[in-house]
Amino acid sequence: METAKVIDFHSLSEKVGRFNLKDKTCLIPEMNRIGCHLLAAVFRGFGIHARVMETCKGQDLGREYTSGKECYPCQITTGDILYAMKEERERLGDAFHAEDYIYFMPEADGPCRFGMYNKYQRIVLDSFPELEKLKIGALSTKDGYSLAGIIDDSRVRELRKTAYFSLVVGDILDRLLWRIRPYEKTPGAGDEFIEKAMRLMESAFERFGPGKDFESILKQLEAVIAEGKGIVDPVIPQKPLIGIVGEIYLRTHVQANQDVIRVLERYGAEVVNASIAEWANYTSYDRLREAKARFRLSLRQFHFGPLKRFLKDMISYGGDFYYQGFRQKKTYQHVHSLIDLPEDHEIGHLEEILKEKDLFSFEVGTEACLSISGIVAYARDGYNGVVNVYPFTCMPSTITSAIVRPIMNELGVPYLDTPYDSSVQPGREAAIRTFMYQAEQHFRRHGRGKGSAQSA
Ligand code: SF4
């Protein structure tokens, strides 16, 4: 008896992994719009033909080829890649060859489902004969998102440094928008400005990124910030400050979270979302932490064989982590001479928060480590409320919610869970309005603490 579909599991190892991007088109799914476009620009600067795929245009395809049990970001990105391929096929006709593309879908090594997206999508792609040869480029948290193998070895370190810098600049542009939009003189000016700013920074990264001319990129950023400040109406009084944590895709993908930041702004908030660089810093920190633990254990057990490997890992991950901290700090220092944008909390500081009352452990991993500690840090910094944004049924975010609710009650800081899927919850706007009423009361009683300034 023949089965309707035979799944070839070799495909998961042969067509999912790190592949050289030479002469390929690298398709990047849009998550946080600005950061993804800057990353694509960095890749282009290094000679990789990269572009960000349109998002949410293929939602019907995403729904058709998922069962509804997958995490929401998996459904959206499945739709994005199928739609992008459909468009390319229509555009190129017989000249379309799936092997000319690499679809970029990173992964995490657990314990939640992020490691399974690219496996699942591989099975979906293999069910279309014309897409079987489309490879999935998977960078993993397992090795701290190493880029080794995707371009010539001699340029990997430069690419990594420039890509990280683009994440930081992307975060800064996002924070600039959230800082100015609630206070804009002309409605819509902030959005219009940031779109133009993103294009300017893309050109800067494409031009100056390969030579690591970060000073020229910073100069362009300075000009952008100066223009952005001009949009603010100084007469509008300060507003309650709201922090956002949660699952990285949902909290940064505007369509997926139904533009939650704008909805909060509509009800009187100024918002700061957790950054993308925070996740990159966390993965490097965590790999370093693991390498140190393994080294110590081997030493204690007199297993001298693997010591050299663990030491090498410590040097490599330690180098990444300290470089990232240095670059991020330096960039924010530069920006702070121009505008008061909040900085990220340091990862070591977030781990300390968890340890204080044994709230959670970095040993468990996932974004719950950052969300739980991030919520407590926001509250201590004087934020007037915190929103946890995540996909419906997301494991780390549900854990976060269970742990922080009693803490926030105790601290007397308003807190809201906002799980999303592709449906629109009728009571969501009312919940946000009520939350903002509470945040406004908190703001009147306590002010904004030091939340609006650097909070590291
Ligand atoms: S973080 Fe949440 S949404 Fe993302 S893969 Fe894990 S369980 Fe799914």
Image (cartoon, rainbow, N blue to C red):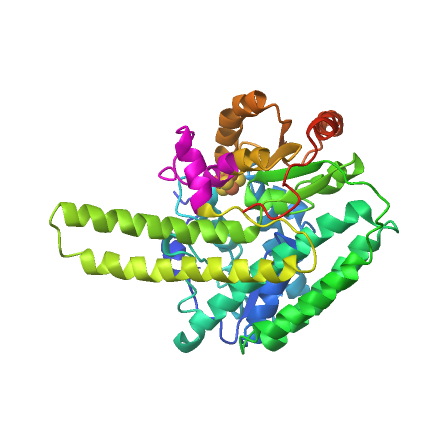
Is 209 colored magenta in this rendering? no
Q: Please state the total of marks drawn on the protein image.
A: 0
Q: Is residue 85 visible?
A: no
Q: Residue at x 46, y 41 (%)?
A: 350
Looking at the image, residue 296 lies above or below residue 155: above
Looking at the image, the residue that sits furthest to the right is: 186
Please state the horizontal and vertical placement of residue 223, each as a whole percent of the image.
Answer: 73, 67
Q: Residue at x 34, y 48 (%)?
A: 289
Q: Between 254 and 179, which is closer to the camera in this rendering?
A: 179
Is 358 colored magenta in this rendering? yes
Please state the horizontal and vertical placement of residue 428, each as a whole percent of the image.
Answer: 71, 28
Location of residue 226 (image quadrant)? bottom right
Q: Is residue 337 visible?
A: yes
Looking at the image, residue 64 lies above or below residue 44: above
Q: Between 142 and 13, which is closer to the camera in this rendering?
A: 142
Q: Residue at x 71, y 33 (%)?
A: 424
Q: Between 28 and 355, which is closer to the camera in this rendering?
A: 355
Looking at the image, residue 200 lies above or below residue 445: below
Please state the horizontal and vertical placement of residue 355, each as a whole percent of the image.
Answer: 39, 34
The region drawn magenta spans 348-373
Give the left or right position of residue 81, taking residue 316 as reference.
right
Q: Between 403 and 42, which is closer to the camera in this rendering?
A: 403
